[in-house]
Image (cartoon, grey):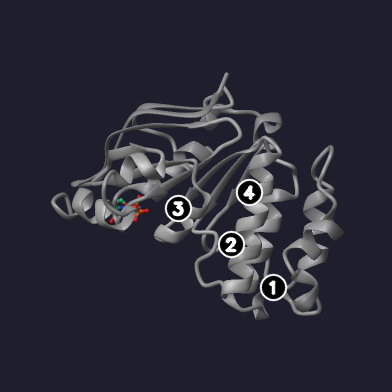
Amino acid sequence: MTETVIVRELRHRYGSTQALDGMSWSAEHGAVTAILGPNGAGKTTMIEMAEGLRRPSEGEVRVLGCDPWHADAAHRARVGVMLQDGGLPGGTRPSRLLRHLARMYASPADVDALVARLGIGDFDRTTMRRLSGGQRQRVALAAALVGRPDVLFLDEPTAGLDPHARRDVWRLIRETRDAGVTVVVTTHSFEEAERLADRVVVVARGRVVASGSVAEVAGTHTLEESYFALTEEVR
Ligand code: ADP
């Protein structure tokens, strides 16, 4: 199976708001898929369904061949999730937290290597709650990678990072992809999509308005120009 994540005709309402209105896309094995779309387009709702955190009211999600809502612990161990606000405990130091998480997996990543790779050693004497947003972001990415997942969901992984940290994160995501992991990343950065994505999915008002390689979605324009043309009329 080459399509590791399949989202089919998802619909979801919050009261009178139609957050998802027939959202369909898929992510291939060993590729980076970038989801781009304005605030309110339904990205978070849809990603939460793919992560198994929210149950779709209509439509279907398949991740590694399973329905994530009903998936067992073995499935969940194969899925790495980096949430935007981290959800990581405040009183712990980064590498201690990562070692703790590593013990939950049968064959975890090498924590020292992850710590070095993401420059976490520079602030490892600080507790999580005292870290800057960018530092916390790097720990959250390490936490998503520590179980050596087959699928990785990253919500705006480089938001708030300085250029060096952003470059390091991009390298790590590419290496992760090259090791055969399916990576799904939401982003508001055209540069990030252009540098990372094998496939781009543009969403607006709960639907996919374009998908394909960066070159296919951009057409004769830049990705940014095409994005505005695609999303302006549906905002
Ligand atoms: P995005 O991540 O693309 O910004 P969301 O999935 O967060 O989009 O939101 C899609 C729409 O659903 C927005 O109009 C948002 O206001 C609405 N929404 C999201 N979560 C809730 C909720 N818990 N209750 C009510 N409305 C919500």
List x then y, in percent, for residue 115: 79, 63
The kind of residue tagged 2 is: Gly
The residue identified by callout 4 is 174
Q: Earlier in the sequence, mark 3 or mark 4?
A: 4
Residue situated in front as seen by the camera: 114 or 212:
212
Q: Secondary structure at mark 4?
A: helix
In the image, which disc is placed on residue 86? 2
Foreground pick, 129 / 31:
31
- Going by the numbered disc 4, the residue's amino acid type is Arg
For disc 3, the marked residue is: 193
Q: Nearer the viewer, mark 1 or mark 4?
A: 4
Foreground mark, 3 or 1, reads 3
> Is mark 1 in CB contact (under 8 Å) with mark 2?
yes
Residue 195 to residue 95: above or below:
above
| Cβ–Cβ under 8 Å for marks 1 and 4 | no
121 sits to left or right of 60: right
Q: Quadrant for the N terminus, please.
A: top right
**Mark found first going from the N terminus, 3 or 1:** 1
Q: CA distance from mark 4 to mark 2?
A: 21 Å
Q: Which residue lies under the disc numbered 1?
A: 128
Label 1 to label 2, Cα distance in Å? 10 Å
> Please, what is the three-letter code of the amino acid marked with disc 3?
Ala
**Mark 2 Cα shell of 10 Å, populated few (<14), some (14-19), many (≥20):** some
Looking at marks 1 and 2 on the same chain, the residue that comes earlier in the sequence is marked by 2
